[in-house]
Image (cartoon, grey):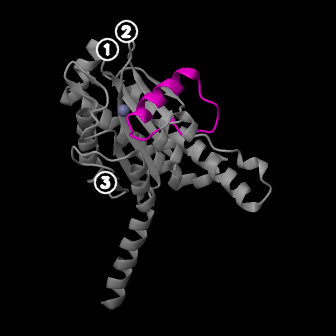
Amino acid sequence: MFKKVLFFALLSLSSSALALDIMVDPGHGGVDSGTTHLGVKEKELVLKVAGYLNTLLKEDPQFKTNFTRTTDQHISLKSRVQKAEAARADLFISLHANSNPDSRVRGTELYFQNSLPPDEESLIIADQENRSEAGYEGLGLIATTSPSKKSDISAIIGDLNRQYRAKSSLKMTQFLSDGWKQSKILSKASIKQAPFYVVSKTTMPSVLIEVGFLTHPEEAKKLTGPKYQQEIAQKIYKALTHYKEMMDKIGDQALQ
Ligand SMILES: [Zn+2]
């Protein structure tokens, strides 16, 4: 009897150890509404998507999910990163909505953590998102010195970690992109890179999803509907299952 109990205790321990720890980060909140257009607030939209995502994830023992916020509260970018680090999350997913002075611009943008120089347009978007944070002084704060110039072991490990994070992050955006392509109702998604504070500062693989443009009248209308929000959550969930499957099957080998 004792052996049987012990066996199940070990089994549940090992299965919980294998669960993928995810930190979901609905952007903005509280005094920071994010992008607001025609009465639609980014902070509310991303919280709804996060809620639908939670409904899917909490039913699946493969995942252990935490949220940087579940209510309309203001949380600093620094504290979002700290929450992910404290939870020792395996993956960080930040949810945002976009705006553009040109109301014709539409679509989902998937940003992954990378050390390559980002294109100019992405720099501007990242700067807008980061600027919503009080005390943020521009992109200069994010720039890091290249560790490859150092010759010690910690620098080499740092480089390997950076490569692992970049490759894993890119894989996740590719799974998301595949899901978006398969969807009949979601807008076109493109993979981009930009030095967003949260994806740059987290030590685990991380992606930032700009779900769509609130400044595009048609897209904004769709984004506010529960059907579209649920579809976004569904595709994120699907991408997470592919990501988990990849990690289980081939682990780090797949990323070499
Ligand atoms: Zn945002």
At mark 3, the secondary structure is loop
Q: Which residue is mark 2?
A: 104
Which residue appears at 55% of the width and 45% of the height? 168
Residue 218 spot, x, y in % from top left: 27, 13
Which image quadrant shows ligand 1? top left
Which is in the foreground here, disc 3 or disc 2?
A: 2
Q: Which residue is mark 3?
A: 60
Marks 1 and 2 in Cβ contact (< 8 Å): yes
Nearest to viewer (mark 3 / mark 1) = 1
Q: Viewer-proximal residue, 115 or 72?
A: 72
Query: Where is mark 1, residue-wise?
Result: 216
Mark 1 belongs to which amino acid?
His
Which is more N-terminal, label 2 or label 1?
2
CA gap, disc 3 to disc 1?
35 Å
**Label 1, residues with CA under 10 Å away: few <14, some 14-19, many ≥20:** many
Q: Is residue 204 above or below residue 33?
A: below
> Is 228 on the left or on the right of 250, as rendered?
left
Left-right relation of 223 to 245: left
- Rendering quarter of residue 77: top left
Which amino acid, by three-letter code, is at mark 2? Arg
Residue 26 got which mark? none
The residues colored magenta run 112-136
Answer whether residue 238 is magenta in the image: no
- How far apart are the two marked residues, 3 and 2, measured between alpha carbons? 38 Å
157 w.r.t. 3: above or below: above
Estimate the x, y position of residue 176 in percent, counting from the top left: 44, 34
Q: Secondary structure at mark 1?
A: loop
Q: Could you tell which of marks 3 and 2 lies nearer the N-terminus?
A: 3
Residue 116 among magenta residues: yes
